[in-house]
Image (tube, coloured by chain):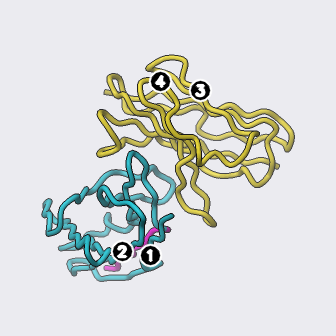
Chain colours: A yellow, B cyan
Amino acid sequence: DAGVIQSPRHEVTEMGQEVTLRCKPISGHDYLFWYRQTMMRGLELLIYFNNNVPIDDSGMPEDRFSAKMPNASFSTLKIQPSEPRDSAVYFCASSLGGPDTQYFGPGTRLTVL
Amino acid sequence: GQNIDQPTEMTATEGAIVQINCTYQTSGFNGLFWYQQHAGEAPTFLSYNVLDGLEEKGRFSSFLSRSKGYSYLLLKELQMKDSASYLCAVRRGYKLSFGAGTTVTVRA
């Protein structure tokens, strides 16, 4: 299997712009998780889906952040408008049957100037 | 809420043993994970403890005491490639909360 795929790997944008991060989970996995990692706050769960349905979005920082999963093989995390404090590495992870063994994607390093 | 503590840094010599401690306080607990993360890379799964006791997997072992809110990851026969950050994560329901990570540096 190709593993979890994320794109882009690096994104540099200016404050106020819309940013869309993409994730393709491992085929057959029914859970998908979006995380954010910064030096200050470590690795934080933003939102997770089960069978394409958002289950818990309590970690989403504010209304500027939104996530969708239109089908089992694709999810997006959107930030609109972006701010410098959103600069971080965003990871997507997927698993089967629960969070027991999550497989992380390579991450998207976002820099907002 | 959850409070997860682990040391910031540890240094050890190649071939030695290192023990990384993790203490946690949580209002709910369904298990504890250890992940390894090399610089600039994604976290990779190492172990998952649900019940008390020691789980051994090759050179890595993980221990859990639920009554004490305590876990450790034991790395034996250290190799240079073990230099990485080690993240302790507590599971509550279907959510994981991660500690800040312990950076282990292995020296020749």
- Magenta region: which residues? B100-108
Q: Which residue is mark 3?
A: A68
Mark 1 and mark 3: Cα distance apart in space: 33 Å
The residue indicated by pointer 1 is: B5
Q: Which mark is residue A52?
A: 4
Give amino acid for label 3: Lys
For label 4, the crowd category at 10 Å Cα-Cα, with few meaning under 14, some 14 to 19 and many 20 or more, is some
Residue A85: x and y in percent read 76, 55
Q: Is residue A43 above or below residue A94?
A: below
Residue B65 position within the rendered picture, expressed as x and y whole percent measured from the top left? 23, 73
Whether residue A46 is in magenta: the answer is no
What amino acid does circle 1 point to? Asp
Q: Residue at x 46, y 58 (%)?
A: B97
Q: Are marks 4 and 1 in contact (CB under 8 Å)?
A: no
Q: Which mark is residue B22?
A: 2
Q: How many other residues sit within 10 Å of disc 2, few (<14), some (14-19) or many (≥20)?
A: many
